[in-house]
Image: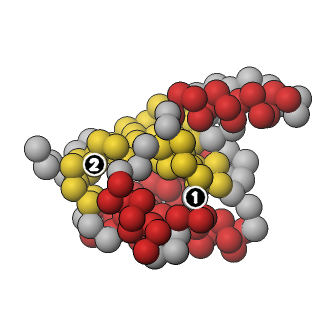
Amino acid sequence: MRNGLYIETIRHLHCTVLRAGGELDHVGRVRFSARINAVWDWSAGPVLVFDLADLDFYDSSIIGVLAMAMQRMEEQGSGRIILVRPSDHLLSVLRQTDLLSRVELRESVEETVAELMLDESARGSPSSAHQRFSTPRR
């Protein structure tokens, strides 16, 4: 059922998880991009973990959202984008637009967060704390 865009952000010490569900079109792109900008400094880098598995519909706006984040990271000279369980269609589009090489792929949000925590623990950083923020469907 398409009923607008739902965005949930979960703040971890080493990354920010952005889960999106519903419909991502041009209007949703504006909201999603604004949310990314709002959480940009929540993690060093930043490290943005995108879980888009609950999107019922998306158009080329998804590429715009990811490209905006990639461009900002490029301008800053740091940051990582991690996509969790992207659909075959999204992988194909990323490949066609030459953006696939600029993202990391993972199978699970939980495993990704744990992996990032372990990486930082090995470097002597404190453990992760998190906060959850959501926006309702519109």
Q: Amino acid at mark 1?
A: Val
Q: Secondary structure at mark 1?
A: loop
Q: Residue at x 35, y 51 (%)?
A: 87
Badge 1 density bin: few <14, some 14–19, many ≥20, Cα 10 Å: some
Comparing labels 2 and 1, the label whose residue is closer to the camera: 1
Q: Residue at x 59, y 35 (%)?
A: 112
Tag 1 or tag 2, which sits nearer the N-term? 2
What is the number of the mark on residue 55?
A: 2
What is the number of the mark on residue 103?
A: 1
Quadrant for residue 101, please give it. Answer: bottom right
Q: Nearer the viewer, residue 79 or 27?
A: 79
Q: Residue at x 67, y 45 (%)?
A: 43
Colouring of the image: secondary structure
- Image position of 80 with respect to 107: above or below: below
Badge 2 density bin: few <14, some 14–19, many ≥20, Cα 10 Å: some
Left or right relative to 53: residue 41: right
What is the number of the mark on residue 94?
A: none
Q: Position of residue 125 (x, y in %)?
A: 83, 30
- Image position of 3 with respect to 119: above or below: below
Q: Single out the residue that lies furthest toward the left.
A: 1
Q: Could you give the CA–CA distance between mark 2 and mark 1, rounded to whole angstroms? A: 19 Å
Q: Amino acid at mark 2?
A: Leu
Q: Position of residue 104 (x, y in %)?
A: 59, 52
Q: Position of residue 67 (x, y in %)?
A: 50, 70
